[in-house]
Image (spheres, rainbow, N blue to C red):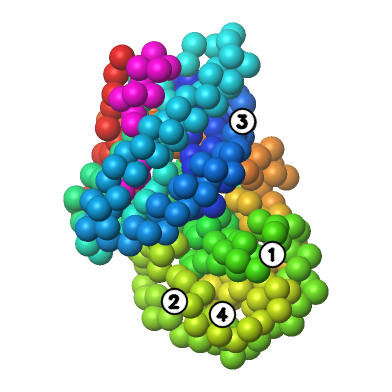
């Protein structure tokens, strides 16, 4: 019988609003027990500092220029991760935590240039928590010809196995970028980034209002679609490219979008329909349309997006929460799971997921 580990996964996504934390119990294979989830919000000042530094950093050269600023931010976010570690560990003091999976904050993801940079001091976090920490999940995949993403499909596959749905089945995570994990009848996994998720919508709202996101898609529901702009976005050659393929939020911007002087609502409608259309394109990429589609990530709460996908894809569509997996914490749970696999020297990426040459180990282990 394989040993089970208590593992804490930490994830700070492209929205840079805070940290998701999840404790699971698993052997890194088929055993899985969800223990607890928690969220820690960044204060406005840290969020602003992070956004300013990351927005200014579009190449390794700029990263080097901003090294001192980013090093200071790295220390700050490491202490913020330590704070949520303390909170969730104290709440679950009846268990002995074995491992922490520390994804860190992505600054640059450029697999075509053979690098992906996440900041976060794993050695410091290991000292502060007195616990083994696994970080740097993407580097080895990239060094072996992969794109370093997506890394969550092995965990998505485990979820689909636990739920016992009919195959082919799909999990679509709508975060800053949307990604899809498709498992066919033979249990072969395909995964790739479909296109923008919440990132452009949130950026538009932040630039044109005092709110941060489109709650339940209410703004998008009240606006009008600009077909011309949508078609321009959809002309991006990425959408015709065969997987494996991956994106960075910096692959998109609103430079040309701004010149159309849309209302707040019309901008939300148009950008939300971009998310809808690119997800539907991805689903239609498969010869066998999935029998069941599950949605996770913050964007699953956007009723405009989900309702419009339902109008196009005539298959059962559910929020993953229906099956007792909290859709806000699937990614943090995934990095808890990948930390166990990394610690046990089991592969965390596959050729048909990231384009890596062969099943690949990953993660740097900092032991106490």
Mark 1 vs 3: CB contact within 8 A = no
Residue 111 appears left or right of 195 = left
Q: Where in the figure is residue 97, as x and y percent of width and height?
A: 47, 16
Mark 3 or 2, which is nearer the eye?
3
* Label pair 4/3, CB-CB below 8 angstroms: no
Q: Residue at x 69, y 52 (%)?
A: 319
* Residue visible at 60% across and 66% down in the picture: 207
Q: Is residue 128 above or below residue 41?
A: above
Percent x, y for residue 79? 45, 27
Specify which label sits upstream in the sequence, 1 or 4.
1
As helix, strand or loop, the secondary structure at mark 4 comes to helix
Residue labelled with disc 1? 209
- Which numbered marker is on residue 239? 2
Q: CA distance from mark 1 to mark 4?
A: 14 Å
Q: Is residue 10 above or below residue 293?
A: above
User: Crowdedness of circle 1 by 10 Å Cα count: few (<14), some, many (20+)?
Assistant: few
Q: Nearer the viewer, residue 224 or 138?
A: 224
Q: Which residues are magenta?
A: 115-130
Choose between 295 and 21: the one closer to the eye: 21
Foreground tag (4 vs 2)? 4
Number of other residues with Cα within 10 Å of mark 4, as a class: few under 14, some 14 to 19, many 20 or more: few
Question: Which of pointers 1 and 2 indicates the residue nearer the eye?
Answer: 1
Q: 25 or 19: nearer the eye?
A: 19
**320 on left or right of 95:** right
Instruction: Name the residue carrying label 4.
Output: 258
Under circle 2, the secondary element is helix
Q: Quadrant of residue 365?
A: top left
Q: Which mark is residue 37?
A: 3
């Amino acid at each position: 019988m394989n040993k089970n580990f208590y593992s804490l996964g930490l994830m700070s996504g492209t929205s840079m609003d805070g940290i998701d934390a999840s404790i699971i119990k698993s052997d890194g294979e088929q055993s899985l027990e969800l223990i607890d989830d928690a969220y820690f919000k960044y204060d406005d000042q840290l969020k602003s500092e992070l956004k300013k530094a990351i927005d200014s950093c579009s190449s390794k050269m700029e990263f080097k220029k901003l090294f001192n600023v980013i090093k200071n931010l790295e220390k700050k976010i490491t202490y913020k991760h330590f704070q949520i570690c303390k909170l969730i560990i104290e709440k679950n003091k009846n268990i002995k935590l074995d491992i922490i999976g520390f994804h860190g904050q992505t600054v640059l993801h450029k697999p075509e240039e053979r690098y992906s940079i996440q900041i976060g001091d794993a050695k410091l976090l290991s000292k502060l928590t007195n616990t083994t920490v696994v970080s740097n999940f993407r580097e080895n995949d990239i060094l072996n010809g992969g794109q370093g993403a997506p890394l969550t499909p092995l965990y998505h596959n485990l979820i689909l196995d636990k739920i016992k749905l009919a195959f082919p089945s799909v999990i679509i995570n709508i975060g800053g970028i949307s990604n899809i994990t498709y498992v066919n009848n033979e249990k072969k996994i395909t995964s790739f980034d479909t296109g923008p998720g919440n990132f452009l919508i949130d950026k538009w709202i932040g630039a044109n209002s005092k709110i941060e996101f489109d709650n339940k898609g209410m703004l998008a529901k009240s606006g009008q679609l600009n077909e011309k702009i949508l078609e321009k976005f959809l002309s991006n050659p990425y959408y015709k490219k065969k997987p494996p393929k991956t994106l960075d939020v910096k692959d998109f911007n609103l430079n040309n979008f701004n010149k159309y002087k849309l209302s707040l609502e019309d901008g939300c409608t148009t950008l939300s329909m971009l998310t809808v259309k690119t997800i539907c394109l991805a689903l239609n990429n498969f010869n066998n349309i999935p029998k069941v589609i599950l949605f996770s990530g913050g964007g699953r709460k956007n009723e405009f997006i989900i309702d419009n996908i339902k109008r196009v894809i005539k298959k059962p569509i559910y929020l993953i929460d229906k099956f007792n997996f909290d859709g806000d914490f699937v990614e943090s749970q995934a990095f808890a799971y990948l930390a166990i696999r990394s610690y046990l020297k089991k592969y965390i990426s596959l050729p048909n997921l990231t384009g890596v040459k062969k099943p690949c180990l990953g993660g740097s282990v900092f032991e106490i």
